[in-house]
Image: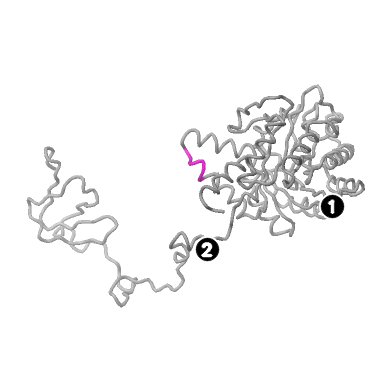
Amino acid sequence: LNFVTGDVQFPRHVRLLVRGDRLGAFNSFNERSCVPRNVASVVATAELERLGSGIASVPDGVLARNVHGAPWVEQRARPRRNRKSAAVRKMVRETILTPANFIYPLFIHEDDSNTPIASMPGCERHSLQSMVAEAKDAWQYGVRSFIVFPKVPDHLKTNRGEEAYNPDGIVPRAVRMLKEALPDSVVCTDVALDPYSSMGHDGIVEDGKILNDATIEQLCKQVICQARAGSDVVAPSDMMDGRVGACRDALDAEGFTDVSILAYTAKYASAYYGPFRDALDSHPGFGDKKTYQQDPANGREAYIEAALDELEGADILLVKPGLPYLDVILRLRQATNLPVAAYHVSGEYSMLKAAAERGWLDERAVALETLLSFRRAGADIILTYYAKQAAKWLVEDGLL
């Protein structure tokens, strides 16, 4: 190596390896021949006289030769042919992601201004006017479905959650405003007592236990109130046994036979819900939710819940969380002919946001790949905080 010129000199009779190319022998190298240092793809491996028969070669019979004398692997099926160009890849693509697959969760509160949610960058609690504006903005990118989650003032919270069926409460008013602003939208409403509970649980608490049947009575009142306000889809997320059938009967008895039920069929007692509970200020007042939400260790149990929900009149079955439970999504897809939904929950969203903020991940690429994975696993519908942004990306990328 000449440290002045940066040149490298090679011995006579050297075999050179050109990276990405075949080995070539250069037997007439002059001792003073040199290769500039910046030609990084050329590397001296050894002198032929020293290596002799130690140079690697392909054993006879491993590769055939085609009529042109080039190496030929005698394989008729070559999957790479279906990947050879963008046009071919798009033509044979198995899974399609569109904004029509999204339900956009919107957090709402009674304040006149919005409040950012620190643990969910990009999300905020909307005033009702801002909620409508945000829905309209998402609409222009193809998002047609929305679900509202309220932050209820503490003074309205009780153990029995009576505010859940107040016809003048925040959710009925939000539903009416959305349907007036976007009549063709699909407005969904969450059915559970935890936003309204002074105990922070999804049901009525008595002696430290969550009451099942007494809670269902409250949920039936809640779905009727929501249906009267104009909700298109009610979504029981409480995980009380028998609540889907009771809600179906209550709706039908009131004449709301067209109101759909999106059942939280496989809702797990997950550690991924923290940012959501920050958004609604609905952390459990004591203990946890493991006596009614499913054990994360159990996959087969989802079949039991799915069979019951379908029998009780559910129209859509939902798995929550989404990404850590792709196996459960696939199981339900294979077990039912009903539409399957996945909830891309707050913890999944916030992890991606945190990594993107640090420059560790390409947010756009990873978010779209994540949403596509739900579809590939079998989800027809995805609840995601990325709904508007992902729809915008899809439009910009010309994927629609």
Height in image: 47 above or below 153?
Answer: below
Give yes or no for contact between labels 1 and 2 (Cβ–Cβ under 8 Å): no
In the picture, the quarter occupied by the N terminus is: top left
Q: Secondary structure at mark 1?
A: loop
Disc number lying in front (1 or 2) = 2
Residue 171 lies left or right of residue 368; in this view the side is right
Height in image: 395 above or below 276?
Answer: below
User: In the image, residue 52 lies at what x, y percent?
Assistant: 18, 62
Q: Between disc 1 and disc 2, whose residue precedes?
A: 2
Residue 312 bears which disc, if any? 1
- Residue at (61, 42) in percent of width and height: 388
In reply to whether residue 173 is colored magenta, the answer given is no
Hey, what amino acid is under mark 1? Answer: Glu
User: In the image, residue 311 lies at what x, y percent?
Assistant: 83, 55
- Residue at (62, 37) in percent of width and height: 347
Looking at this view, name the residue that lies furthest to the bottom.
67
10 Å crowding of disc 1: few (<14), some (14-19), many (20+): some
Q: Label 2, on which residue?
A: 91
Looking at this view, name the residue that lies furthest to the top.
155
Q: Which residues are magenta?
A: 360-365
Q: CA distance from mark 1 to mark 2?
A: 40 Å
User: In the image, residue 234 lies at what x, y percent?
Assistant: 79, 44
10 Å crowding of disc 2: few (<14), some (14-19), many (20+): few
Hey, what amino acid is under mark 2? Answer: Met
Residue 84 bears which disc, if any? none
Residue 267 lies left or right of residue 360; in this view the side is right
Nearer-the-camera pick, 206 or 317: 317
- Residue at (11, 37) in percent of width and height: 4
Residue 337 lies left or right of residue 222; in this view the side is left
In the picture, the quarter occupied by the C terminus is: bottom right
In reply to whether residue 361 is colored magenta, the answer given is yes
Residue 201, located in which quarter of the rendered image?
top right
